Amino acid sequence: MAEAIRQEATDVTVTTTPSTIRGPGAFTAEPELFSALEALYRAIRQRDPRQMVDACAQSDHLTLWGSDAREELVGLDQLDTLYSDTIWLGACPAWISFAAERRVIGGSGDTAWVADDVRATFPCEEHSVDTLRMRCTSVWERQDSAWRLAHLHASEPRR
């Protein structure tokens, strides 16, 4: 897989923890972006709507999409649904873990994109702990010297 990507883009490097493939060119804001991603995933894991809102871009083009057609939030005025809507935080299990296992990242200037393969675990009566795998694609903007989420699409791939 990495070889195919390497052929399509120049200067691609592959690292680990999570395994990360970097897009072409130098993207020097990576440590700050990784911190913002970890803060977002921590907010999701803790089901903390205030931290999730704080992670989002203060912009009318903010977009959050899930696998279900009802999981659609567009614009700041819909951001309050994170607090009350059972489709967003209310429908999520109480996560034990929520972390990227593989990451593809790229960006330029004040815009970045990330595609993560996420492994999440949660309590389950049947097995005590169950695992959910998701693909999360996000677009980030730098606002006031901080990376903020402008778009997130999370879905469960069919296996």
Image (tube, grey):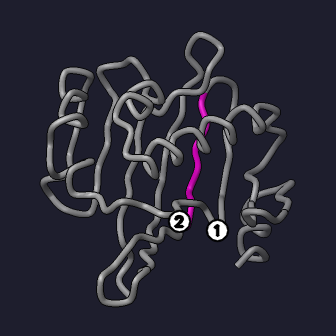
Quarter of the rendering occupied by the N terminus: bottom right
Vertical relation: 43 (above or below) 96: above
The image quarter containing residue 35 is top right
Mark 2 burial class by Cα count in 10 Å: few <14, some 14-19, many 20+: many
Secondary structure beneath dot 2 equals: strand
The image quarter containing residue 116 is bottom right
> In this picture, which residue range is highlighted in magenta?
111-118
Residue 49 painted magenta: no
**Residue closest to the eye, 105 or 124:** 124
Name which residue type carries label 1. Answer: Glu
Disc number placed over residue 144 in the picture, else none? none
Vertical relation: 136 (above or below) 150: below
Q: Read off the residue under disc 2.
A: 118
Relative image position of residue 75 (x, y in whole percent): 25, 26
First in sequence: mark 2 or mark 1? Answer: 1
Q: Is residue 98 left or right of residue 59?
A: right
Q: Read off the residue under disc 1.
A: 101
Mark 1 burial class by Cα count in 10 Å: few <14, some 14-19, many 20+: some
Relative image position of residue 67 (x, y in whole percent): 26, 63
